[in-house]
Amino acid sequence: MTLQTPLRIGTRGSKLALIQAEEVRARLSRAHGLSEADVRIIAITTTGDRIPDRPLAEIGGKALFAKEIEEALLEGAIDLAVHSMKDMPAALPSGLVIAALLPREDPRDALICQATARIADLPRGAAVGSSSVRRQAQLRRLRPDLNPVPIRGNVDTRLAKLDRGEVLAMLLACAGLKRLGLAHRITAPIETEEMLPAAAQGAIGIETRESDERLRNLLHAVNDRPTEIAVGCERAFLAALDGSCRTPIAGHAVLDGDRVHFRGEALTLDGAFSFAVETRGDIGDAIRIGHEAGEEVKAKGGDRLTLAG
């Protein structure tokens, strides 16, 4: 296949984001016989990247990692955008769609700690680094005696703070560590029964203009249908809760043949209250299942979840 003009992939400029964009380029090239010159990667600095020292909840949330990239898409400066789906708000700007999802990497959270491989065995009062309000709330619920410490920055920056002893342990996503070639830094994956991951954690999404039918057809060749179903269920749960980075929300869907098993929860920021749901159904109903689960959790949480946001 020959393109008249190169496809332009927009992405954040972090090492992990560029690795993910390279994976998208490689898969598109294999699927359509494209050369490296046919697919360009354009790094875009986002507002979230420019303000690395303040909690996301204070500066506008996860949308700040996509804002400038999505503006470039809408303006036609790029043709597609590559995102970590766990960082994407529940609602996309009008005119944009997630046209494909790559096969999902390990969705679990990772504990990184030289002292122990279990959260249960961390010493009382231990400082545990995490940039995620979801992980912080879950940690407070599991171990109210621990000290969650907000730490932002790229993975290397966070690990350096751990290595310098600023915190005793760190919570990160297994997926990012594995994609960066840092799986050896994972002391232990945290099973989803202990800490439910963020909706769409481990999934790479490709966003483009809804009107660009030709490009959407090209992207269909690299779409992973099981990931699409599971992530669709999880993001429907997130959307029903009006989820943002300011509200601790977790959701995880697992496919078993033609059935989907979904578990979700929303917590108060202090971890004192958790409102959970578990449900199963046909994969054809995955989005409805996620939405109804979100409505159920919202009804259970009531004003407490409003206060959490």
Image (spheres, rainbow, N blue to C red):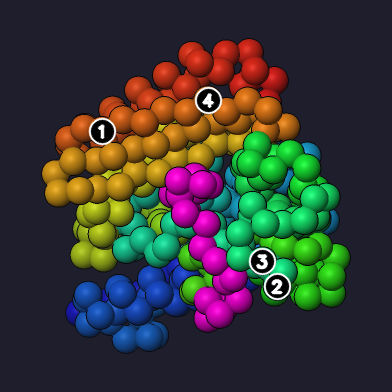
Give the residue at x 49% y 73%: 178
Give the residue at x 34% y 37%: 262
In the picture of the structure, the residue carrying the numbered disc 1 is 280
SS under mark 4: strand
Mark 1 residue type: Arg
**What separation in Å lies between label 3 and label 2 (alpha carbons)?**
6 Å
Q: Is residue 280 above or below residue 230?
A: above
Q: Which circle marks residue 116 in the picture?
A: 3
Mark 3 residue type: Thr
- Classify residue 251 as left or right of residue 103: right
In the picture of the structure, the residue carrying the numbered disc 2 is 114
Q: Which residues are magenta?
A: 180-201
**What separation in Å lies between label 1 and label 3 (alpha carbons)?**
35 Å
Give the residue at x 31% y 30%: 279
Give the residue at x 20% y 48%: 256
Mark 4 residue type: Phe
Q: Residue 4 appears at what percent x and percent y?
A: 30, 75
SS under mark 1: strand
Nearer the observer, disc 1 or disc 3? 3
Nearer the observer, disc 2 or disc 4? 2
Is 183 within the magenta?
yes
Is 240 within the magenta?
no
Cβ atoms at labels 1 and 2 below 8 Å apart: no
**What separation in Å lies between label 2 and label 4 (alpha carbons)?**
32 Å
Query: Which of the two residues, 232 or 38, is positioned nearer the viewer here?
Result: 232
SS under mark 2: loop
